[in-house]
Structures are given as C-alpha cells and as structure tokens.
Image (cartoon, rainbow, N blue to C red):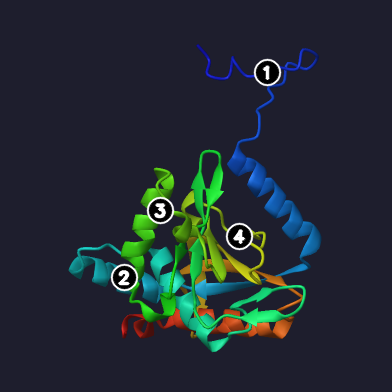
C-alpha cells in the first residue's frame, strides 16, 4: 500500500496534506522570524581548493580518521573567526555580543528537516579532532541520538550542499548568530595561472550577514581571510 494513502486529502484538488512535525514547525517559525526580522546581505567569493585536495589525500593515507573537505572548511572558518571576532557575534535588542569561544554549528539534513549540532572550540582543535567529532555528531543526528548540549552554544553556522552538486546558494541566518556560510561544490574548471590556462579546482562560498552586526567591509575581510586559509592549508595542520 502507498505510504501516503493514509494522509488526509483535499477532495477538490486531490492534493495531499501533511501535518507539520514538531521539527518542521520549529524550522518554519525560526526561518520566518529570521527572514522577516534580520536584515540579510550576501557576499560570495571563489576559493582555489587544489592545495586542500592534495593535502587531504596525503593526510588520509596517514590517518585512521578520514578527513573531509568540510573538516578543512570548519577549521579554516574557525581561524578566520579568530582574526575577525565581529563575525563571531550575536545580536540582542540591547547589544552586540562578541563571543570569546568559536563554536561552529554544522547543518545536517534529515528526512523531516535539519538539525545543527555544534563542534565546540573549533579554533583549539586539530582538523583530525574536528573530523572525528563532526562525524560522531552527524551520525547521532541521523539516528536521533543527539543530546540537548550537542545543539546549544553555536556562534556561527556552516551549511554545505556541495555533496549534492549545488554550485552556489544563499543560506538563512540561524538567529541570534550574526552570519552563516553556504558552501557549494568543488568544481574542476579551467583557470588562468601566470598567463596560462590550466585545470583547477574551485569552490564558491556565500556569507549571509546580519547587517545590524556586520558591515560589508567586515564580511569581505572575513571571506578574504577564509580564502587565504584554504588556499594555504598547511597552516591548518600546524596545531
């Protein structure tokens, strides 16, 4: 029997009406509040990922815990937030809160919505440590075994749809955080290097900013630092 046959149907249009799950209802409320109350603006840049690709292949031959591209991105974002603390901030009605810790939420898609488990103190952890913790959180998110502490305390969020072949998108800010980074797919494209056309690997990222907290120049400087971190990834594995 069709699993949807027991759902209520509109007799006029034969459309199927699905009742809202608690998760879907919460997402709807929070995203509506964000888009209607938070003045978003967006900044996009292109990052050369060739060195990250080479370094990742090298490390994954040596380490038991495999490292994903997203693990490098999380670490690079953490380092960039350390240098640009105005982006690692939250809005309240009375002040702007600059957070002394860098806790990065990683959006994980589920069948009925998404959750954002948080990797705490990312700037103080190695890429391998981030990889292990992020994988554990994602696995427990998909099996509905996250604890309340796992989704609290985030200061910045990353949403990566690159694995679905999405080249570029803009994400909705997760309030009260002041920004969210949308990560697209790594694409093999022709690039110009020293006047020569070569094969390169590029990735587009888009930073959604709360304009009450972050001005354009601040967001641009953050993205410039993120680009520098990922295009020189050796720095990310020094700690």
Whichever of labels 1 and 3 marks the residue nearer the N terminus, that label is: 1
Q: As drawn, is 163 to the left or to the right of 135? A: right
Q: Which one is closest to the eye, mark 3 or mark 4?
A: 3
Instruction: Tell me how far mark 3 sits from mark 4, CA to CA.
Output: 23 Å
Tell me the CA gap for discs 1 and 4. Answer: 36 Å
Sequence-wise first label, 4 or 2: 2
Q: CA distance from mark 3 to mark 2?
A: 14 Å
Residue designated by label 2: 129
- Is residue 33 depicted above or below 70 in this figure? above
Under circle 4, the secondary element is: loop
Q: Kindly identify the residue that appears in the image at 51 percent across and 39 percent down.
A: 111
- Near mark 2 (Cα within 10 A), the count class, few <14, some 14-19 or many ≥20, is some
Residue on which disc 1 sits = 8
Q: Is residue 196 visible?
A: no
Relative to 200, is 127 on the left or the right?
A: left
Secondary element at tag 2: helix
Which of the numbered marks, if any, corresponds to residue 168? 4
Whether tag 1 and tag 3 are in contact, CB under 8 A, the answer is: no
State the CA–CA distance, disc 1 to disc 3.
33 Å
Q: Earlier in the sequence, mark 1 or mark 4?
A: 1
Tags 3 and 2 touching, CB below 8 Å: no
Tag 3 secondary structure: helix
Instruction: Give the secondary structure at mark 1.
Output: loop
Upstream in sequence: badge 1 or badge 2: 1
Q: Image height check: is 121 above or below 21? A: below
Q: State the image coordinates of residue 180 (x, y, percent, origin top left).
A: 61, 67
- In this view, 58 is above or below 96: above
Q: Which mark is residue 138?
A: 3
- Indicate which disc, 3 or 2, sits on the residue closer to the N terminus: 2
Residue 29 in view (yes/no): yes
Nearer-the-camera pick, 159 or 165: 159
């Amino acid at each position: 029997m069709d699993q949807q046959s027991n759902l209520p149907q509109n007799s006029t249009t034969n459309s199927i009406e699905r009742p809202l799950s608690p998760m879907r209802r919460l997402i709807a409320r929070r995203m509506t509040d964000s888009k209607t109350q938070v003045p978003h603006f967006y900044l996009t840049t292109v990052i050369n990922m060739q060195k990250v690709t080479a370094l990742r292949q090298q490390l994954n031959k040596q380490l038991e815990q495999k490292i994903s591209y997203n693990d490098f991105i999380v670490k690079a974002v953490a380092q960039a937030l350390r240098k640009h603390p105005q982006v690692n901030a939250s809005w309240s009605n009375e002040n702007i809160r600059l957070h002394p810790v860098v806790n990065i939420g990683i959006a994980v898609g589920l069948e009925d919505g998404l959750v954002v488990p948080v990797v705490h103190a990312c700037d103080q952890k190695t890429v391998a440590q981030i990889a292990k913790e992020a994988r554990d959180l994602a696995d427990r998110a998909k099996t509905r075994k996250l604890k309340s502490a796992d989704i609290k305390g985030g200061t910045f969020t990353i949403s990566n749809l690159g694995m679905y072949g999405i080249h570029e998108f803009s994400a909705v800010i997760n309030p009260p955080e002041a920004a969210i980074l949308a990560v697209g797919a790594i694409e093999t494209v022709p690039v110009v290097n020293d006047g020569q056309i070569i094969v390169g690997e590029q990735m587009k990222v888009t930073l959604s900013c709360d304009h009450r907290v972050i001005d354009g120049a601040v967001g641009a400087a953050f993205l410039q630092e993120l680009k520098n971190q990922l295009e020189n990834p050796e720095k990310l594995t020094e700690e």
